[in-house]
Image (cartoon, rainbow, N blue to C red):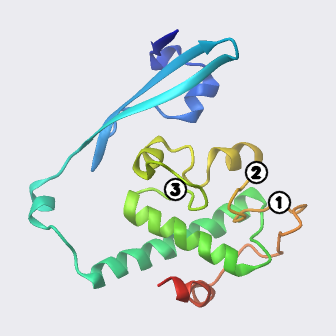
Amino acid sequence: SIRTVHPTSMTSSCKSLLPCRPRSGLLAGCVRRTLSSSSQGTRCRFSVKIRAETTSSESATTSSSQEDNSAVVSKNLEVMRKFSEQYAKRSGTYFCMDKSVTAVVIQGLAEHKDELGAPLCPCRHYDDKALEAEQGFWNCPCVPMRERKECHCMLFLTEDNDFAGDEQTITPEELDEFTEAMK
């Protein structure tokens, strides 16, 4: 049987998976949680109704120049670089010993931040990236990273990981060097 669950009756573990609040902005909608019971136990399911909202100024501007897009990506790259360094220090994790892995993941996060408005994990496949970004489970730092220090991307590695380096920083020049082929 399937039933809709009101946010106030959710268990705390289910609430932590997906914030339940009305969304606004470019992608707006409501999140509906349902619990489905079967012989294998109870599972949370999520469905989201999304509607596009545009303002008159957004409608008037249908495309931006390549320079503007480049500046936004560059800004998001710097934002994600700084975030990654701060989170590594705060969580006691380290970047991969191969800095190109770190650079490519940060580049992917910056691109998703530009495209989706959220730093969706670039190392996973999604049927609907916008929906995943809206739900937030895989937005960096993802729930597995926050709860268990498990980073699928190898961006944030614990000391005992064989691939962990000894650095928690990456320079803008290193990012440029390792992501040059992606541009």
Q: Residue at the location (39% across, 33% down)?
A: 48
- The dot on residue 1 is none
Label 2, residues with CA under 10 Å away: few <14, some 14-19, many ≥20: some
Q: Position of residue 87 (x, y in %)?
A: 66, 61
The residue sitting at 61% across, 53% down in the picture is 141
Q: Position of residue 136 (x, y in %)?
A: 51, 44
How many tags in the picture? 3
Residue at the extreme top: 1
Identify the image quadrant of residue 58. bottom left
Q: Label 1 to label 2, Cα distance in Å?
A: 7 Å
Instruction: Measure the alpha-carbon separation of dots 3 and 1.
Output: 21 Å
- N-terminal of the two: label 1 or label 2? 2
Instruction: Say which element carries label 3.
Output: loop
Tag 3 residue = 120
Q: Is residue 157 left or right of residue 78?
A: right
Above or below 4: residue 57? below
The residue under label 2 is 149
Q: Which residue: 40% across, 50% down?
A: 130
> Which one is earlier in the sequence, the residue at label 3 or at label 1?
3
Q: CA distance from mark 2 to mark 3?
A: 17 Å
Question: What element does badge 2 sit on?
Answer: loop
Q: Residues within 10 Å of mark 3 (few under 14, many from 20)?
A: many
Q: Position of residue 76 (x, y in %)?
A: 45, 71
Q: Are marks 1 and 2 in contact (CB under 8 Å)?
A: yes
Query: Residue beneath label 1, please?
Result: 158
Question: Disc 2 or 3, which lies upstream in sequence?
Answer: 3
Q: Amino acid at mark 3?
A: Leu
Amino acid at pointer 1: Thr
